[in-house]
Amino acid sequence: MELLDQDFNPSQVEGTIIGDFSPAVNVSRLVSFNGKLICTNEKVYVMPNYNAGMVDAIGAGFYKPRCFTYAEIDSYNKTGLAGYRITLKDGTVLNFSNVFGKMRKGITAALDEGMGK
């Protein structure tokens, strides 16, 4: 997984976008941020969406934007009533919440397409 600059934004995403979603990005059970999950034909981007005041309050390095290739994905599946989990081959687990029916199906379809399924 590649950590991106704190100021990385969706306009800098490389590749053709096959899915753009706005789930909550869960850092822990108690800390989550509104975010972006963007699937392109090459990589998956996870970007927290918080303003400058939140960055000052939590520290700029607390949760940086990141991306990974489809080859790094071990599994992806729904969790609970409104959750989604992507597990990478290196053991990294990315959890998302506020992922209901249509978004859950959309994320799965985009990841399936990126994985060539």
Image (spheres, rainbow, N blue to C red):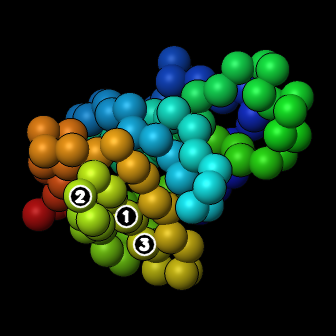
Where residue 81 sits: x, y (%)? Answer: 23, 58
The residues bearing labels 3 and 1 have C-alpha atoms spaced at a distance of 6 Å
The residues bearing labels 2 and 3 have C-alpha atoms spaced at a distance of 18 Å
Q: Residue at x 27, y 52 (%)?
A: 82
Q: Amino acid at mark 3?
A: Thr
| Residue at mark 3 | 87
Residue 76 falls left or right of residue 48 = left
As drawn, 51 above or below 112: above
| Residue at mark 1 | 85
Circle 2/circle 3 CB separation < 8 Å: no
Badge 3: residue crowd in 10 Å (few <14, some 14–19, many ≥20): some
Residue 44 falls left or right of residue 6 = left
As drawn, 2 above or below 6: below
The residues bearing labels 2 and 1 have C-alpha atoms spaced at a distance of 12 Å
Residue 95 falls left or right of residue 84 = right
Where the N terminus falls, by quadrant? bottom right
- Tell me the element at label 3: strand
Q: Tell us which disc is closer to us: 3 or 1.
A: 1
Q: Residue at x 79, y 48 (%)?
A: 62
Circle 3/circle 1 CB separation < 8 Å: yes
Q: Residue at x 38, y 32 (%)?
A: 22
| Residue at mark 2 | 81
Where the C terminus falls, by quadrant? bottom left
Q: Tell us which disc is closer to us: 2 or 3.
A: 2
